């Protein structure tokens, strides 16, 4: 201890209390050192957000980093900067916070030291633990993290369970916090009795188990870091920083949607990513879900040379820039979920001439989207991964959809959770290697988003929630009115939108046709799929397809308009490459009428709104295809009145005229 206090030239503080304020002063985080323990509490406008909450880390074979602490140095700074995203919901993002770092040293035991660094934004609080190399050791085994989030337990939370076989793919359920019996995933969105909306999440998750949350013995939410197969949470070399723990804070659900704290807590890219381009794509894909084609070779094999060329031609006609091909390689025969130990990522099946298809695509300026279904067998995948990226890259394939189906991963012969430290490391290794070969990813069965796409923009999108693949009974219309306030706070999602064959008996969707168009605006994704078979766009409803043809993937600005979690959601977004605006709206199983103010439009400018809405008799159960397409002259002063059918929605394109 003498050593550290001499180093910093300060008398260590044994008792301390300090209020950390957001730039606008409305959020106050009180950090206290009392009886050797550090705690924090948060208020907004004088009202409790989190009551006194504990901090600390348990170590294997060592005393916890929690008690007997003193503060040897406090460092404060302010940051107010803007940065520009390459792909995203918002081009220019403001990063405005006050930062305070508490350098701690133990007064007892080993005199170990660590830092807790806080950042207070106008719409949230974040902090992380930073552990420098210690005189006595350079490595640590973290056996638990003791971070508390002491929210009023009468609050309601929208939760999905952690540690379950389908990873993040569950329906959200609204529960009082006191009734969260088992661990839940983040972002965990919470409505407090005082009417605040919070979302607890993490940012910059690298080389550590992902944080889930559970109630501890004091009925307080606490971090539950996903364990490795040996029960430990992480093995780390020092210096080491944990991911940021983030509490997003809003007065209304709609405000949460534009919270950029998680992205802001990630580092800017360290290499050139100007080669990253967002993409709209179709795919040899939904035909497999409805049983027309198969992944495996045979009479109805999807990924043949002939079908691939047909899809490339269709993409050209549909003004779509990409074509996904699933079932192109060996590994799909029989029960493919069992084949992961031997899947081959380097050779196409015999009825697919991949080189010929790649040349055909290149000549037509269509990007192929490759596919790597690993079934979570990381050992087999990593043994081929670099060769597999090189193989695609040499063929000019610069987009890959990797998949990690299966309930656990196999890593170094052990069964590990996808969201464990071992899983997190693999996803990051794959992403960095993909960047080396200028490959962009759309990861299915991914690790949850923690804003790392700011640093690695080639991570264009991910799945990581129930998407339309689950339709056919497993999704209710309310799902799409919940995810904007929960899962989507973690970043974009490949929801596989744009199914026009909504009435298909094999995969009936709980959706009207107009709602399929709405998703392109309500669900942000750096890669957007037009997921149906081309004939449904070209032959069945070409006028509705016009919206998909025009809607962009990359946005200048996002303006959320209306939202009630589980009931409805309406958002406007401006195209990054034109003056056009788009609006999308979705409702739950109830009809909903909205009256939208258009004050995001320019003054003294007339516009045309192309509206794709549910017809007056549309219904997600018995009139899914009822759609009305119309144009109206509008200006900034006008309101748009639109009715959404039960399970319905609408999409609008607005252009200057
Ligand atoms: C699950 C993915 O989410 C889906 O999109 C893919 O088609 C299958 N796995 C097969 O890889």
Image (cartoon, rainbow, N blue to C red):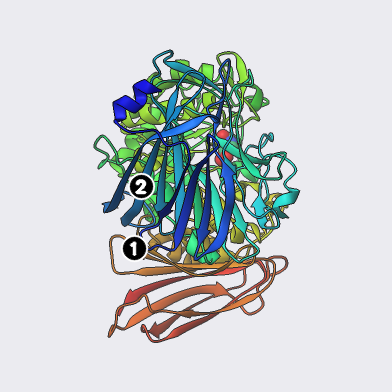
| Residue 249 against residue 212 in the figure, above or below | below
| Residue 217 against residue 539 in the figure, above or below | above
Q: Which mark is residue 188?
A: none
Q: Please state, as top left, top right, bottom left or bottom right, where the C terminus lies in the image.
A: bottom left
Q: Residues within 10 Å of mark 2 (few under 14, many from 20)?
A: many
How far from the left and from the top, in percent, is residue 424? Answer: 50, 29
> Quick check: marks 2 and 1 in contact, CB under 8 Å?
no
Dot 2: element? strand
Residue 265 visible, this angle: yes
The residue under the point 27% across, 35% down is 270
Name the foreground residue: 499 vs 162: 162
Residue 626's quadrant in the figure?
bottom right
Name the foreground residue: 329 vs 483: 483
Residue 419's quadrant in the figure?
top right
| Residue 134 against residue 556 in the figure, above or below | above
The residue under the point 50% across, 45% down is 32
Q: Which residue is mark 2?
A: 99
How far from the left and from the top, in percent, is residue 3? Answer: 35, 21
Name the foreground residue: 469 vs 104: 104
Ligand 1 in which quarter: top right
How far from the left and from the top, in percent, is residue 549? Answer: 41, 60
| Residue 208 against residue 42 in the figure, above or below | above
Residue 541 visible, this angle: no
Q: Please state, as top left, top right, bottom left or bottom right, where the N terminus lies in the image.
A: top left
Dot 1: element? strand
Viewer-side label of 2, 1: 2
Q: Residues within 10 Å of mark 1 (few under 14, many from 20)?
A: many
Q: Number of labelled discs?
A: 2
Q: Which residue is mark 1?
A: 575
CA gap between label 2 and label 1 equals 34 Å
How far from the left and from the top, in percent, is residue 535? Answer: 52, 55
Whichever of callouts 2 and 1 sits on the residue coming sooner in the sequence is 2
């Amino acid at each position: 201890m003498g050593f550290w206090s001499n180093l910093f030239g300060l008398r260590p503080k044994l008792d301390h209390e300090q209020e950390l304020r957001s730039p606008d002063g409305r959020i106050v985080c009180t950090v206290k050192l009392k009886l050797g323990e550090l705690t924090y509490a948060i208020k907004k406008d004088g009202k409790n957000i989190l009551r006194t909450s504990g901090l600390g880390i348990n170590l294997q074979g060592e005393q916890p980093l929690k008690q007997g602490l003193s503060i040897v140095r406090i460092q404060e700074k302010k940051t107010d900067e803007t940065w520009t995203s390459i792909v995203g919901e918002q081009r220019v993002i403001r990063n405005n916070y006050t930062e305070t770092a508490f350098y701690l040293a133990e007064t007892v035991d080993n005199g170990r030291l660590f830092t807790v660094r806080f950042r207070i934004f106008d719409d949230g609080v974040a902090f992380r633990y930073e552990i420098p190399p210690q005189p006595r050791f350079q490595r640590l085994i973290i056996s638990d993290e003791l971070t508390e989030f002491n929210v009023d337990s009468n609050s309601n939370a929208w939760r999905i369970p952690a540690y379950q076989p389908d990873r993040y793919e569950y329906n959200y359920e609204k529960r009082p916090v006191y009734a969260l019996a088992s661990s839940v995933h983040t972002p965990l969105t919470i409505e407090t009795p005082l009417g605040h909306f919070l979302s607890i999440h993490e940012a910059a998750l690298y080389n550590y188990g992902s944080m889930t949350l559970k109630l501890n013995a004091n009925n307080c939410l606490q971090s539950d870091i996903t364990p490795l197969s040996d029960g430990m949470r992480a093995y780390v070399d020092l210096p080491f920083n944990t991911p940021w723990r983030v509490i997003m804070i809003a007065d209304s659900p709609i405000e949460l949607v534009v919270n950029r704290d998680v992205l802001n807590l990630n580092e800017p890219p360290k290499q050139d990513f100007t080669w990253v381009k967002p993409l709209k794509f179709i795919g040899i894909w939904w035909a497999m879900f409805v049983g027309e084609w198969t992944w495996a070779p045979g009479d109805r094999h999807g990924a043949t040379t002939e079908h691939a060329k047909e899809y490339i031609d269709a993409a050209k006609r549909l003004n779509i820039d990409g074509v996904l091909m699933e079932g192109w390689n060996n590994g799909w025969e029989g029960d493919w979920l069992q084949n992961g130990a031997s899947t081959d990522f380097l050779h196409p099946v015999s009825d697919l001439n991949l080189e010929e298809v790649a040349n055909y695509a290149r000549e037509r300026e269509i990007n192929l989207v490759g596919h790597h279904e690993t079934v979570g067998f990381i050992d087999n995948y990593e043994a081929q991964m670099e060769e597999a990226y090189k193989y695609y890259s040499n063929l000019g394939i610069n987009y890959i959809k990797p998949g990690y189906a299966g309930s656990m991963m196999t890593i170094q012969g052990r069964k590990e959770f996808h969201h464990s430290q071992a899983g997190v490391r693999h996803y990051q290794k794959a992403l960095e290697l993909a960047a080396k070969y200028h490959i962009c990813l759309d990861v299915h069965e991914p690790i949850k988003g923690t804003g790392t796409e700011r640093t690695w923009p080639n991570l264009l999108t991910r799945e990581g929630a129930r998407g339309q693949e689950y339709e056919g009974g497993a999704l209710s219309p309310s799902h799409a009115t919940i995810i904007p306030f929960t899962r989507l706070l973690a970043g974009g999602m490949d929801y596989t939108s744009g199914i026009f064959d909504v009435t298909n008996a094999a995969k009936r969707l709980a959706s009207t046709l107009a709602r399929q168009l709405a998703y392109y605006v309500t669900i942000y994704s750096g890669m957007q799929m037009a997921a149906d078979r081309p004939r449904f766009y070209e032959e069945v409803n070409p006028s509705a397809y016009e919206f998909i043809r025009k809607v962009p993937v990359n946005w200048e600005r996002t303006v959320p308009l209306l939202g009630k979690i589980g009931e409805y959601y309406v958002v406007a977004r401006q195209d990054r490459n034109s003056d056009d605006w788009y609006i999308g709206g979705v409702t739950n199983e109830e009809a909903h009428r909205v009256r939208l103010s258009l004050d995001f439009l320019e003054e003294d400018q007339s516009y045309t709104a192309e509206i794709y809405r549910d017809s007056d008799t549309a219904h997600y159960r018995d009139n899914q295809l009822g759609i009305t397409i119309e144009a109206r002259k509008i200006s900034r002063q006008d309101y748009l009145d639109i009715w959404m059918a039960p399970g319905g929605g609408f999409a609008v394109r607005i252009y200057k005229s």
